[in-house]
Amino acid sequence: MVEQAAVNRKVVGSNPTSGANKTRMDHKKALEILLELRKKHVLTDEENEAVSTAIGVFSITYLAKNRLKKKFDQPT
């Protein structure tokens, strides 16, 4: 049963054009949710550290995405 679930998950997530990607959250929204979660003070120290790390990763990727977009949108 567990092996079949792993196979199903792999099949769904393996195709970048599958329906699974349509429901992915953008980084800005994920950042907002994680920041709000930290404000609630319901996390353990380890969970808070994990959320802080995720916030850092999302921040960097969000900034990089905007920087690349700005670079490619500039007229040559």
Image (tube, grey):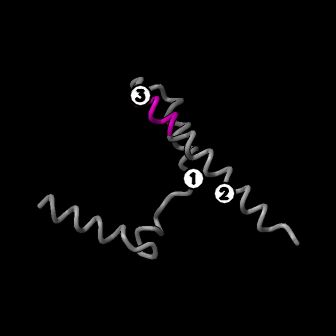
User: Which one is nearer the viewer's eye here, 60 or 29?
Assistant: 60
Residue count near mark 1 (Cα–Cα under 10 Å), binned few <14, some 14–19, many ≥20:
some
> What range is drawn magenta here?
47-53
Quadrant containing the C terminus in the rendered view: bottom right
- Mark on residue 65? 2
In x, y percent, where is residue 8?
24, 68
Q: Amino acid at mark 2?
A: Lys
Tell me, for residue 27, which label it has, or none: 1
In the displayed structure image, the side of residue 41 where residue 2 appears, left or right: left
The first of marks 1 and 2 along the sequence is 1
Label 1 – label 2 distance at C-alpha? 10 Å
Say which residue appears at 67% left-offset and 53% top-offset. Answer: 64
Q: Quadrant of the N terminus?
A: bottom left
Question: Is residue 44 rendered magenta in the image?
Answer: no
- The residue under the point 51% across, 57% down is 25
In the figure, 18 relative to 25: above or below?
below
Majority SS type along the magenta span = helix
Q: Which mark is residue 62?
A: none
Lateral position of residue 70 relative to residue 21, left or right: right
Q: Nearer the viewer, residue 8 or 67?
A: 67
Who comes first in sequence, dot 3 or dot 2? 3
Q: Nearer the viewer, mark 1 or mark 2?
A: 2
Please identify, in this view, whether the residue under mark 3 or under mark 1 is nearer the observer.
Answer: 1
Task: State which tag comes first along the sequence, 3 or 1.
Answer: 1
Q: CA distance from mark 3 to mark 1?
A: 21 Å
Instruction: Please tell me in which quadrant of the rendered image residue 48 appears.
Output: top left
Disc 1 and disc 2 in contact, CB within 8 angstroms: yes
At label 1, which amino acid type do we have? His
**Residue with the mark numbered 3:** 43
- Measured as percent of width and height from the top left, residue 73 is found at 80, 68
